[in-house]
Image: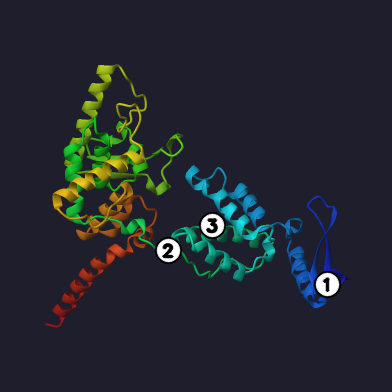
Amino acid sequence: MASFRKRSSKWEYRVSYLDKDGEQKIVSHGGFRTKQLASAAAEEVEKAKRNGGDLSNRDVTLADYWDAWVARYKTGKHTMITEKRYPIIGKELRAGFGNRLLREVRPSEWQDFMNQFGETRSRSTAQRLNGYVRSMVKNAINDQLISVDFTLNVELSGSRGKSEADKFLQADELQAIMTDALSHASYNNISNCLIYLGAVSGARYSELVGLTWGDVDWVTSSININKTWDYHFGQGFQPTKTPSSVRTVSLTPEAMMLLHRIKSEQTAYYIRTGRRDDLQMVFRNKQNTVPTNAAANKALRAIEDRVEKKMDRPLSARITFHGLRHSHVSFLLSRNVDIYYISKRLGHSDITITLRVYSHMLDDSREKENNLALEALESLEN
């Protein structure tokens, strides 16, 4: 049972427990205005004690619990670029809460923190931070350190801006980009090859630069995406983003002809210089590297400049390399290609991911389907 004592004008509770080594310990907390408030707080501790909660960790701060949670559940289990976010979030939590105990954080305090965070961040960044911390909170609840999910029902703020998935080219613009890229594509200008393949395949940049010649199936006119290339940290081949990202993507005859030409030019260069590439990478250039993401985007900007000049008007959007993937989806949807097929072609694990990311692109398609449905129903009435 808890014991209580009055210190000056405030009340304190004390609860004894046995730690994991069987030694008796005391957890206490003071500063309560009344004994009733101290008793209510002590009851929470007693409840956690009865349910086998770890009382030794009860006075952990929010920031310290975050660090411990990351070390236990996250470190070494995700890509390096994802794991770079964890210490950044930890820094934000320390700046916002200092030594505030995890169990003392209230939903209203978290809302205030998120409001302030959103003043200088995008809404998507705020959503990501809240999502990570919510995962941590679920573990804290399971550990019986807290009983309330203070991240639940938080109202997110932040600039909405234009999401990456909103930045895509119209069909005629995509065609112009592909035509220009193909006309300038060569082994000497391999970034243009990469851009063309990105537009025609919808594959991610890291997936394309991770291709080896053994991944090209000349018989079925397709590429096998089964790995990526770590262009952020130089760690070489890495697994795909998710297991479902391993897939076979069919290509057009024009794309296969381009790959064949690049292989011929690359092989001729290797013979002439005596160089070898034991990895047999498709996009290995004369500098013995693959084009960086920055180089690919620079080449894409040059293509966009030329296309705008030729079309004598601005493009509907200035995109990055990843925007080629979104433009690829937009074009397929405009041609009434089945969303389930598109989802598999993109390497999404679930069609709901495709629907969520590209829901804004489906509005026009829904209108067309609605008209078709009404026409079909009207035919029954005649």
Question: What residue is pinned by disc 2?
Answer: 159
* Residue 294 in view here: yes
CA separation in Å, label 2 and label 1: 44 Å
Residue 232 picture location, percent across and down: 44, 39
Q: Dot 1: what SS? A: strand
- Viewer-nearest of discs 1 and 3: 1
Amino acid, disc 3: Tyr
- Pick the quarter of the image with the C terminus: bottom left
* Residue 225 in view here: no
Residue 40 picture location, percent across and down: 76, 74
Q: Is residue 128 left or right of residue 285?
A: right
User: Viewer-proximal residue, 14 or 166?
Assistant: 166
Q: CB under 8 Å between callouts 1 and 3? A: no
Question: What residue is pinned by disc 3?
Answer: 132
Q: Earlier in the sequence, mark 2 or mark 3?
A: 3
Q: Which mark is residue 10?
A: 1
Q: Is residue 141 left or right of residue 205?
A: right
Q: Dot 2: what SS? A: loop
**Quadrant assignment, res 246:** top left
